[in-house]
Image (tube, rainbow, N blue to C red):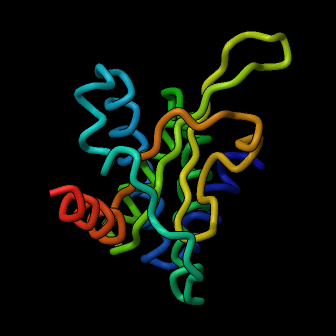
Amino acid sequence: MSWSRQLRAFVRFPWTQKMMYAEAYVLLAWGRVLKALPFAKVAPSLGSYMKETPEEELSRQELLTIRQVSKAVHGMSRYTWWESQCLVKAIAAMKMLERRGLSSTLYLGSGRDEQGRLAAHAWLRCGSYIVTGREGHEKYTVVGIFGNGAAADREAGLMTRQSG
C-alpha cells in the first residue's frame, strides 16, 4: 500500500486508536534505547526475575485490549527507522499492558537458527495469549523470565513471605 493510502487510512482511525499507535511508536523507541544499554541495568525495569504471571482466562475486554496492543506494536514496528525486532516489541507491549493494568510475562530464549548458529528470541505473554514473538517461540529454550504487574508482584511477595 502506498504512503498516501496508509496516511488516509490512519486519518480515518478513531482518536483512541491513533493515540495507541502513537504510544506504541514512542515505546518502541524506548525499548530500542533499553536494548542498547547493558542488560544488568535494564533487567530490574522488566519485572520480577523468574516469576511468571498466571495463564488465566481473560475477559473479552482484556482480550480485546491485548489484541489492540499487539496490533499497534506490530504495525508501528514496520515504520521505525531503528531495529524493532522481538525484544523491542516485547518491551513496548509490556509497558503498554502495564499502563492498562494488565500483568504479563516476558520470556527470553536461546536456540539455534537454520544454519546452526546461536540465536535469541523474546516473546511476551499476557494470560494465555502470546502478545508478541509468537512465531517460532517454541523452538527456543527459555533462559529468562520477567513477570510484570500485580500478579507477578503477588507471586514475588508470596515467595518472600514463605522463605522468611
Q: Quadrant of residue 15?
A: bottom left
Residue most toward the right? 114
Please tell me whether residue 40 is drawn above or below residue 67 in the rendered image: above
Please tell me whether residue 90 is drawn above or below residue 85 in the rendered image: below
Residue sitting at 52 percent across and 65 percent down? 126
Please tell me whether residue 24 is drawn above or below residue 161 in the rendered image: above
Pinpoint residue 59: horizontal percent, then vertical percent: 55, 89
Residue sitting at 28 percent across and 70 percent down? 154
Residue most toward the bottom? 60
Pinpoint residue 125: horizontal percent, then vertical percent: 56, 59
Quadrant in which the C terminus is drawn:
bottom left
Q: In this figure, what is the number of numbered marks? A: 0
**Camera-side residue of 61 and 41:** 41
**Camera-side residue of 150 and 61:** 150
Residue sitting at 55 percent across and 77 percent down? 56
Relative placement, left or right, of 48 versus 10 is: left
**Camera-side residue of 117 and 34:** 117
Q: Quadrant of residue 34?
A: top left
Relative placement, left or right, of 96 versus 139 is: left
Residue most toward the left? 164
Please tell me whether residue 157 is drawn above or below residue 42 in the rendered image: below
Relative placement, left or right, of 114 versus 28 is: right
Residue sitting at 36 percent across and 56 percent down? 95
Pinpoint residue 96: horizontal percent, then vertical percent: 39, 61
Pinpoint residue 143: horizontal percent, then vertical percent: 53, 33
